[in-house]
Image (tube, rainbow, N blue to C red):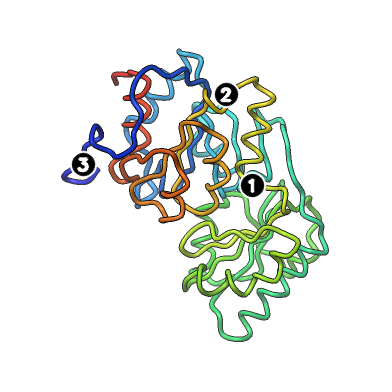
Amino acid sequence: MSATPAPLLDVPGEPSGPADIRLVVTDMDGTLLDDDKRPPAALRPLLAELRRRGVLFSPASGRQYATLAEEFADVAEGMVFIAENGTYVVRDGVELSSDPLDHATAAELARTVRGLAARGVDAGAVVCGKRAAYVERTDEAFLAEVRKYYVSHRVVEDVTAVDDEIIKVAVYDFGSAEHGAGPALAPFADSHQVVVSGEHWVDVMNRTANKGAALRGLQRELGITPAQTMVFGDYLNDLEMLDAADWSFAMANAHPDVISRARHLAPSNNDHGVIRTVTRILGIEL
C-alpha cells in the first residue's frame, strides 16, 4: 500500500447506502493485484466473510484458468473463474461456458506475429488452449512474461499445429501493445475481437467473446441481476464487463476509457481499492 492511501470516502462518484450485492467480480492485474502482482493481505479474510454472507467472488482475467486456479487454490471451492478474457468460464473444475476460436484463424494469427518478428517487432504469440498455452519463442525474457499469466504452458516447434481446443491468441509486445502489435492485428478486427488487455498484451478472440458476455451468462445461470453485481476493472478488456453491473468501478489507475465507462471510481490497485470499496459498500469490518 502506498504511504498515503487515497481517501476512500472522497472518491468521486462512489455510491453509498445499502446494497444487495450477490456477486463481486474483479479483474486481476492492475485491479486486485498491486503493481508487483501481489494480492492484498486482507483478501483472504474478505473472501471468508463474503462466503459467509453468500456473496460469490469471481476473478475475471486475461490469465488462463490454470493460473487463476493456482492463485486461489486454498479458496477455490465454489468460486467461478472467468478466464482468458471470458472465453473460458469454470467452476469447481467444470466448464460452464467457452467460446472456442477456429484453428484456421489461430494459425493465421500466429503467422502474422511471426511476420511482425521478422520485421523487427519484438513480439511473440501465445496460442491459448483449454489444456495449456503454446509458444514457439524460447528466449527467457519472453518465457518469463508467459509464466506470469500461463502456469500451464508448453514450448512447441509449431504453434499452428497444436492439438487442443483454442480459445484465444495472445500477443506479447515488448514495446507498446497499443501502438505496436495492436494496430498490426487490426485487420482481424473485421471478424474478431482485437483487445489491448495491458501495456504489452493484445488478445484476439471471437467477436462474441469478452468478459461482459461471460458475466451476463453467469448472471443468467445464477439468477443474479446487474443491480446485485459489483465489478472492478482497469483496462480496455474490462469495458464490456463494466456494462454488465450497476455497481461498476474503474480503478483510479485505470485507462481513461475505462474511467469514463464505469459508473464509479475506486482507489488504485496499489491502494487496495477493491478491498476497501467492497468492505465499505457491504459494511464489512476486517
State the SS at label 1.
Answer: loop
The CA span between labels 1 and 2 is: 24 Å
Mark 2 burial class by Cα count in 10 Å: few <14, some 14-19, many 20+: few
Name above or below for residue 101 compared with residue 283.
below
- Residue drawn 60% across the image and 30% down it: 80
216 horizontally vs 121: left or right:
right
Mark closer to the chain start, 1 or 3: 3
Image coordinates for residue 55, horizontal then vertical, percent: 50, 19
Amino acid type, mark 3: Pro
Helix, strand or loop at disc 2? loop
Q: Which residue is mark 1?
A: 210
As displayed, is residue 74 above or below residue 180?
above
Residue identified by numbered label 3: 5
Mark whose residue sits in front, 3 or 2:
3
Residue behind mark 2:
77
Relative depth, front residue between 245 and 92? 245
